[in-house]
Amino acid sequence: MADKVQVDLDELIEFRAHLVAFNQLLSDEYRRMKNHWYNMNEVWNDAKYYEFGEALEDVAKGIDRYLQVTPDHEQHLYNLIDRIRAVLDTAI
């Protein structure tokens, strides 16, 4: 009995595109928010300003870690999609 593999190539392609777009948006928007917060120091300079900054630093650790590892996932998905396309092309 032959093994059967079902793959939704379009879904993989769509997910990878979403992942790449999300990662870029996350990186850009986090950087913009941090810069905006930093520039608010002249008009918002109280304990909550510094508390907010500490929270940004806490979340930055997770964002930085995520953004460091996710290129490997993007590349893995790219390679997987490429291999599946090659198999599908030879099966036709």
Image (cartoon, rainbow, N blue to C red):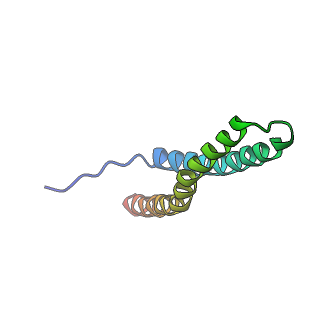
The residue sitting at 69% across, 42% down in the picture is 50
Q: Nearer the viewer, residue 4 or 61?
A: 61
Residue placed farthest to the front in the image? 47
The residue sitting at 72% across, 43% down in the picture is 33
Quadrant where the C terminus sits is bottom left
Quick check: can you spot residue 8? yes
Q: Nearer the viewer, residue 32 or 19?
A: 32
User: Which quadrant would residue 36 be assigned to in this image?
Assistant: top right
The residue sitting at 47% across, 64% down in the picture is 79
Residue 18 point in image, percent of width and height: 57, 45
Position of 43 compared to 10: left or right? right
Q: Nearer the viewer, residue 39 or 77?
A: 39
Position of 72 compared to 51: left or right? left
Residue 14 point in image, percent of width and height: 53, 45
Residue placed farthest to the left in the image? 1
Residue 77 point in image, percent of width and height: 47, 58
Quick check: can you spot residue 17? no
Quadrant where the N terminus sits is bottom left
The residue sitting at 43% across, 64% down in the picture is 83
Residue 65 point in image, percent of width and height: 52, 58
Position of 9 compared to 17: left or right? left
Position of 26 compared to 5: left or right? right
Total numbered labels placed on residues in the image: 0
Q: Is residue 30 above or below residue 47?
A: below
Residue placed farthest to the right in the image? 42
Q: Nearer the viewer, residue 11 or 60?
A: 60
